[in-house]
Amino acid sequence: MSEQRLPFDPIAEARRHWEAHGWVDAAPGMAAVTSVMRAQQILLARIDDVLREVGLTFARYELLRLLGFSSAGSLPLMVIGSRLQVHPTSVTSVVDRLEEQGLVRRLPHATDRRVKLAELTDEGRRLVDDATARLNETVFQAPGLDPDDVELLIELLRRLRRDAGDF
Amino acid sequence: MSEQRLPFDPIAEARRHWEAHGWVDAAPGMAAVTSVMRAQQILLARIDDVLREVGLTFARYELLRLLGFSSAGSLPLMVIGSRLQVHPTSVTSVVDRLEEQGLVRRLPHATDRRVKLAELTDEGRRLVDDATARLNETVFQAPGLDPDDVELLIELLRRLRRDAGDF
């Protein structure tokens, strides 16, 4: 988080340095990329403040939320990785941690025992709904932009994600 | 990074779930925040791929770059934290690592010895220019959006950063 309010925009300042060094073609991209990095820090700090109160990280919350939306409350680990766009080893470590917390359990698929599922426990289901209500109220209903800007930001980043091959 | 291309946009899908659960006021903010998180992962992975080749992380690169832009090639640690908008303890650990790599050295301020400075070494100056050239060519000149969208993204995130009290 910012330790103090600067009297100028540090990213605009970096852009001026870029241009002054002759890196004119790269200056807008540098400013855009650095802006995304900083926005992520700001938003993640807000999310972490909320989720810390219920003993979750954002990665663990996202996994619980995905399971909560599934009709059975369970999904194969491979599907979880694909939907959350994270590496299988990350899924494993997040599920390990959630299992230790008693929020999910691992079980084999009913018809193909080679497929491992993660399933919400009752406590996991209760916690993810509590966490969602807190995040909605504290972060998602007030993301720091007016409604038109929110829609525009979603659309711009959708293009960036599509260009990167996400979907 | 994405392990596979999904046949649908997972954030649009999450937004539909949010709306179906009646969290209509929070759905756009959820989609915007999640989009920023995912865009950051995509961009940081690209940056890390480039910086790994020269033995840097983005945090270490940013600190070297800031010193490289300063007229003396050195800045007080407190100023570095304020400009990079990171906590003093993070500055300390990044400077520790850069000092181990021989890229910066710590020294006392010429007129106020209580003030600690970080200064680029010759090797640090050489490396930050090399790293910048690589990042410009590989990431910043091709950020994954067309030029108009890049400017719009910078402006939207400037509003978000200003709203968060960055400047």
Image (cartoon, coloured by chain):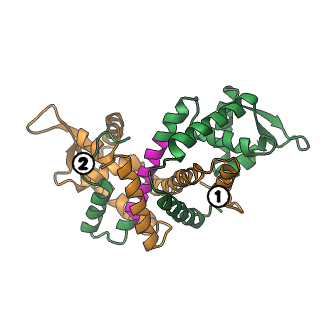
Chain colours: A orange, B green
- Image coordinates of residue B19 in percent, x first then y, are 28, 68
Residue A155 colored in magenta in the image: no
Q: Which of A65 and A157 is in front in this view?
A: A157
Give the residues drawn in magenta, as a range: B29-45
- Image coordinates of residue B131 in percent, x first then y, are 61, 36
Q: What residue type is labelled 1?
A: Ala
User: Which chain letter matches label 2?
Assistant: A
| B134 to A53, vertically: above or below | above
Q: Would you say B153 lies left or right of B13 here?
A: right
Count of number-bearing discs: 2
Residue receiving disc 2: A121
- Image coordinates of residue B35 in percent, x first then y, are 40, 56
Residue A56 in view: no
Q: Is the magenta stretch mostly helix, strand or loop?
A: helix
Secondary element at image label 2: loop
Residue receiving disc 1: A12
Q: How far apart are marks 1 and 2 (CA)?
A: 48 Å
